[in-house]
Amino acid sequence: MVATKSKTIKVKIWRGDHEGEMLTYEVARRDNQTVLDVVSEVQKKLEPSLAYRYSCRVGVCGTCAIMVNGEPRWACRTHVSKVAKDDELTLEPLRNMPRIKDLVVNMDEFFAKWQHVGSDFKSERTRDDKPYEVNPKSAKRRKANAAIECINCGICYAACDVVGWDNNYLGPAALNRAWTLVNDVRHVGSSETLKKASAEGGCGSCHTQGSCMTYCPVSLSPTGSIAGLKRASLFSFLKRD
């Protein structure tokens, strides 16, 4: 990247854990510069102790997710030219998760909720059986495919106000995963998954604000998945009666 002549950008970065402060750094403004480029430059040249996460740098892994000017984003996919206000950036750790240090958060609770409702895929077949034939054009498969690309980056969880209000709420990513299982014809525990997804803290707690859908970096719609779970839960209840 080429530095823009005599241009700099001021970067305010959260330093510390839940107790800390915003510190300001100044780096060169460069062509095609991403937020991750900025953070990396601060760490390499100005503040070696700065803690942050990244892995692939190309928008595949999602580990570089942080708050950029108050909005959850992948740092590697966010170009400075599109988000900087008056040549300034404010960078903070993701919302709704405990802060460990600087831009790093503890995602244990996020993954625990996902595992509670989304990790129980059950099949009646073994590796010795013939593979299950799934019709890719079936309604259930299309619904599952629409939600299956989630990589658990935590963006939707950080964007969700309900998660901030209600610690028991499973959150968009976990419920999105539950929707893929409910629609997976190979999964023999669909009713159990639906029961977990519609229990206290499940899909009924969603206020349908759509923030998860707005900020999802891969354009998924957890809002739509949760709406599907609500309908399926209602139909299941009526069928029991």
Image (tube, rainbow, N blue to C red):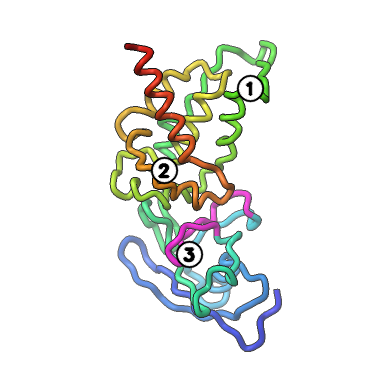
Splitting the image into 4 quarters, where does residue 71 fall?
bottom left
Inter-mark Cα distance, 3 to 1: 40 Å
* Residue 141 spot, x, y in % from top left: 61, 25
In what element is the residue under mark 1?
A: loop
Would you say residue 118 is visible in this rendering?
Answer: no
Q: How crowded is the residue under tag 2: few (<14 C-alpha within 10 Å), some, or many (20+)?
A: many
Label 1 with label 2: CB-CB less than 8 Å? no
Splitting the image into 4 quarters, where does residue 204 fall?
top left
Splitting the image into 4 quarters, where does residue 145 fall?
top right
* Residue 128 spot, x, y in % from top left: 67, 11
Inter-mark Cα distance, 3 to 2: 20 Å
Residue at label 3?
Answer: 68
Q: Which residues are magenta?
A: 59-74
User: What numbered label is drawn on residue 110?
Assistant: 2
Q: Residue at x 60, y 79 (%)?
A: 29
Q: Nearer the viewer, residue 141 or 80?
A: 141
User: What numbered label is drawn on residue 138?
Assistant: 1
